C-alpha cells in the first residue's frame, strides 16, 4: 500500500471495481416540517338583512370552513366607523375540515353601519 498526498492507495490487485460508473450526484437535506395543530378558518358566506329599523335586533349568519386542524375558533364583529367591537369575541370548538354556520345577534343603531366580521383561532 502506498500513501500519496496523505491518502492510502491500495495496490491495483486489492481494489474493488464497480462496473457501473457514477456520472453525477447531489446531496440534499430535507427539513422536518413543523405541523401546526391549529384551525384555519375561512368565511364562505354571510347572510344578513340589507336594511333594519333602528333598535331592532337581528341575526347575521356567518358560514365557514375550517381548512386546518381541530381546535378553538372565534368570531367577533367590529363597527368600521367607530372601531368598536359591537359583538364581543365568542369562542367555539371546531373539528378539522368542518364547515358550518354561526348566528350572531346585533342591534341596529340609529344610523347606517359598516361591519367587519372577523373569524380566527386560538393558538
Image: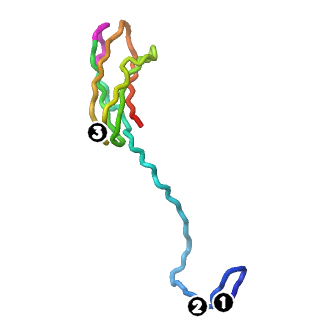
Label 1: element kind = loop
Residue count near mark 2 (Cα–Cα under 10 Å), binned few <14, some 14–19, many ≥20: few
Residue count near mark 3 (Cα–Cα under 10 Å), binned few <14, some 14–19, many ≥20: some
Q: Is residue 3 above or below residue 70?
A: below
Q: Residue 17 at x, y = what percent?
A: 55, 86
Counting residues from the start of the chain, the first of labels 3 and 2 encountered is: 2
Look at mark 1 in the image and give the residue it sits on: 1
Q: Is 28 left, or right, of 67 in this rendering?
A: right
| Contact flag, marks 2 and 1 (Cβ < 8 Å) | yes
Q: Residue 66 at x, y = what percent?
A: 33, 38
Figure quadrant of the C terminus: top left
Q: Is 102 left, or right, of 78 in this rendering?
A: left
Q: Is residue 83 above or below residue 30?
A: above
Magenta-drawn segment: 48-56
In three-dimensional space, the C-alpha distance between marks 3 and 2, rounded to whole angstroms, equals: 66 Å
Q: How is the image coloured?
A: rainbow
Q: Is residue 93 above or below residue 111?
A: below
Q: Is 38 left, or right, of 14 in this rendering?
A: left
Label 2: element kind = helix
Q: Residue reaching furthest right?
A: 5
Look at mark 2 in the image and give the residue it sits on: 14
Look at mark 3 in the image and give the residue it sits on: 98
Q: Residue 44 falls in which quadrant of the image?
A: top left
Residue count near mark 1 (Cα–Cα under 10 Å), binned few <14, some 14–19, many ≥20: few
In three-dimensional space, the C-alpha distance between marks 1 and 3, rounded to whole angstroms, equals: 70 Å
In three-dimensional space, the C-alpha distance between marks 2 and 1, rounded to whole angstroms, equals: 9 Å
Amino acid at each position: 500500500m502506498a500513501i500519496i498526498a496523505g491518502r492510502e492507495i491500495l495496490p491495483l490487485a486489492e481494489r474493488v471495481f464497480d462496473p457501473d460508473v457514477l456520472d453525477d450526484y447531489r446531496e440534499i437535506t430535507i427539513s422536518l416540517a413543523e405541523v401546526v395543530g391549529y384551525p384555519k378558518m375561512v368565511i364562505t358566506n354571510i347572510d344578513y338583512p340589507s336594511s333594519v329599523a333602528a333598535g331592532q335586533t337581528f341575526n347575521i349568519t356567518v358560514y365557514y370552513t375550517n381548512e386546518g386542524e381541530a381546535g378553538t375558533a372565534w368570531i367577533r364583529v367590529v363597527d368600521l366607523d367607530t372601531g368598536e367591537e359591537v359583538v364581543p369575541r365568542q369562542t367555539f370548538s371546531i373539528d378539522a375540515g368542518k364547515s358550518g354556520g354561526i348566528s350572531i345577534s346585533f342591534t341596529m343603531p340609529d344610523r347606517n353601519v359598516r361591519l367587519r366580521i372577523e373569524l380566527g383561532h386560538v393558538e
